[in-house]
Image (cartoon, coloured by chain):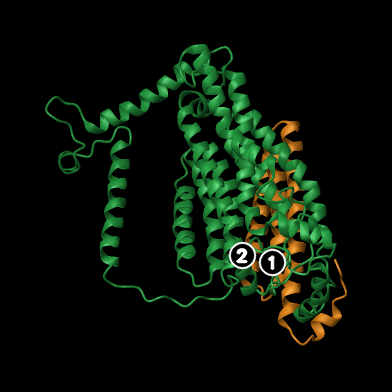
Amino acid sequence: MQSPILDLALALGLLITAFRALHTRVLFTGVVFYIAFGMLMSLVWVRLRAPDLALAEASLGAGMIGAILLDAARALEGGTDPVAPEPRSRIGRLPAAVAAVAFTAILAVTLLALAPGADRGEKWNRWTGFGTDRTGASGADSLRGTMTDLGDQVATNLSASGVTYPVTAVLLNFRSYDTMLEMTVLFLAAVGSLMVYRSGRQWTNREESSGGQSVAVSPVAEGATRILAPFGVLVGGYLVWRGSSAPGGAFQAGAVIGAIGVLLVLAGLSPISGPDARWIRVALAAGPAAFVLAGAAGLASTGRFLGFPPGRAGTVITVIEVAVAVGVGVTLALLYAGGRMERPLARAARENSGLAEDSHVVDPGADPSDRSPRGVESSRPDRKERQIGDPLHDSGDDDRGAPDERRSNADR
Amino acid sequence: MILDALAVLSLLAAVIFFVAGMLGVTRFPDAFCRLHAVTKSDNLGLGFVVLGLALAGGSLLSMAKLILIWMLAVGSSSAACFLVARQVMIEENRANRPPDDTAETSSSTI
């Protein structure tokens, strides 16, 4: 559907929000503009007739990454104060500007040349190399031919793929090798972030710089999360099931489940109690493991790794999709929850001493016998027993006075 | 025919409410006022969009789905509005040391 005004407005909106997101002195403003950019980008994907990408962009770009960036902005000096502009060297900017302009120009020329039926004259052909050579063949024509060839190949083989939606067929059957490697990359990212969480003395400093105030979880937050979380799981399951015949799919479902994980963490209901929980490891490994197992089964039955027999391809794809959705969801929730996790030692000490927390300092590096001021001053737990006094009336100093004696009791 | 006209009217009303909400967000002086603008008028605008689509678009099942989605959006944005307001109030109380009128007159503990 031709709608040049809408497309132009979206393009302008993209440029403006991207510019505002980068050129701001307040981190929080930048993150908010980035979230707006994500929403506009998802509309652009709809206009480009890629609804799966629109779903992924809305849930991941605007949702998950927005939440992670807000947390990061808060960790960096609170994120609401303007940062001083750093002096930038003038020398480095000119080559970067030239490279950026050249890259954009090449992209624009390529896109214009690929437009169907484009023949822009002799000078264009000579300058861009997209012209016809002596045999009459054109570079742009062969590029266009490749694109339609692939589309035709997918269309002819769709019935043998086990699903009826071409995007899912390409992702999980024709190019399942690429998706398997994507899942491995995600798994490595999760492992890498777990390694960072474990070594986390820097999280102590983060809480110091932001004042270390704790806020009790409101019953409204907990109640709303209790109502919304099942809806989220339902939407995730629906997207997985629907992905075989309509826009949807495992990654989008995983993003929704990750967003539900973020809600649970914020409401104090998170089931992620630490990086060592076995179910987390199983869930993280489920994605790549499902691919490898399916590939081995395919090797056994059809003689090719990841070769699905046409009769059973649908079932195999569904199983893989469920595993991918769970794995992606847990990875994303873990990435968000990681900044608020506590080490098992600190948690055990807190539980044994039975005291309620007074601040959500994460102290993964300390053991219970540490007498430093940040000793066992635990962390954001997976329960909501963090209500010390009335957060709407408390002054910050009150929180400091009370726990000293309790902490000394805990150290016994 | 009548249904299409009503649908167009609903969508126009939705545009008006969204523009009003946008003006409120940019021009209101206080965080709480801006929350009013965002939550109330944007959700009402969304309701008019849903009404217009339901009038224009056909099956009873899709109408019911749209209305359910709107109710979900209203519920979750109300909760979000409350939580944002609560956070603003907490931070204002933290910033105003020693306690002044703001802290003493707020009696809510949720």
Q: Which color was chain A given? A: green
**Can residue B1 be seen from the camera position used here?**
no
Tell if the residue under mark 2 belongs to the same chain as the one under mark 1. Answer: yes
Which residue, given by chain and number where applicable, does mark 2 sit on?
A: A203
Where A307 falls versus B104 (above or below)?
above
Which residue, given by chain and number where applicable, does mark 1 sit on?
A: A361
Residues under labels 2 and 1: Cα distance? Answer: 8 Å
Q: Are marks 2 and 1 in contact (CB under 8 Å)?
A: yes
- In front of the other: A138 or A258: A258
Tell me the residue at 25%/62% (across/down): A95
- The quadrant of the rendering that contains the C terminus of chain A is bottom right
Q: Chain of mark 1?
A: A
- In front of the other: B12 or A164: A164
Amino acid of disc 2: Trp
Amino acid of disc 1: Val
Q: Secondary structure at mark 2?
A: helix
Q: Is residue A135 left or right of residue A283?
A: left
